[in-house]
Image (cartoon, rainbow, N blue to C red):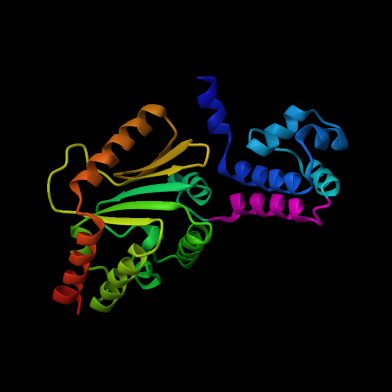
Amino acid sequence: MASTIENRRRTPELRSFGAVVRRLREAAGLKQVELAAVVNVSRAYIGHVELGKTRCRLDFAKRLDDALRADGEIITAWNKLLESIKSVKYAAYFVNFPKAESTAALIRVYETHIVNGLFQTEAYAKVLIKDPDILNTRINRQRQVMSAPAPRIFVVLEESIVHRQVGTREVMREQLEYLLELSERPGIRLQVLPTIYVEDARAAFAIATQADRSDAAYLVTGTGGVTSADPDDLANLHERFATLQAEALNVRDTRALIRRVIDEKWT
């Protein structure tokens, strides 16, 4: 129970800030105990900051920046992370998952009705999202997650998605051509699930796995969605995703299917 509570407190924002501190400490050639002595705290506190277990104050971030001769990098990182928490405009039920997604080493996605937000072209997204601020957030989210070093991404799409018209035929053709392009990128595995019954595959979901193997999941519901770090939920979703991958077309056959749909329906 204690470890579960601790993992929930270690938000992606704090993990990101802690990673900056650790990188700069190591670049300075200091051990945690040595840095702790310089800034007059315990070694354990430095460890907690680097692991994202605690949220230090801005004045402490300034002390770290001075001690590591970071030229303002730690302060900038701290302010940037705080602003990202305040300003990113997501639906209330989605607010925690994008941060887990942005720091993930591995992302697994199952989609049932539309192309996943990470893979949407701007034209496709515009049809779905009418609020310019939310659209801008969607595009920025894509850039952040997909920029180097990008996570490994495994996606299973229901076949109906490549047939379902969103916007014009031109929008659909561009979107499917973009899926083909993405499927060729290292680290991305795209599979289409044929129109078959798969037990327990009733709703879309995504799992973001961090470098330390901790997970967060986003599950679509009838009225929005929910983010979960519950071990039972995650175990269930891991098993469900493995089943979906096994039932889906392989990567090469997926590309062939998408090309055929483009030629037959969207050209």
Is residue 67 within the magenta segment? Answer: no
Residue drawn at point x = 69 percent, y = 47 percent = 23
Q: In which quarter of the image is residue 221?
A: top left
Examine the rendered structure and indicate whether residue 37 appears above or below residue 99. above
Residue at far front of view: 29
**Image mark count:** 0
Q: Residue at x 53, y 24 (%)?
A: 3
Q: Is residue 160 left or right of residue 55?
A: left
- Does residue 164 appear in the picture of this structure? no
Residue 183 on image: x %, y %: 33, 63
Q: Look at the magenta stretch and give its main secondary structure.
A: helix
Region rendered in magenta: 69-88
Question: Residue 254: horizontal and vertical position, in percent?
Answer: 22, 60
Residue extending furthest toward the top: 1
Please tell me whether residue 87 belongs to the stretch shown in magenta: yes
Residue placed most toward the observer, 235 or 92: 235
Q: Which residue occupies the foreground of this view, 25 or 78?
A: 25
**Quarter-of-image position of residue 58:** top right
Please state the horizontal and vertical placement of residue 257, each as a whole percent of the image: 18, 65
User: From the image, which quarter does the C terminus lie in?
Assistant: bottom left
Residue 43 visible somewhere in the drawing: yes
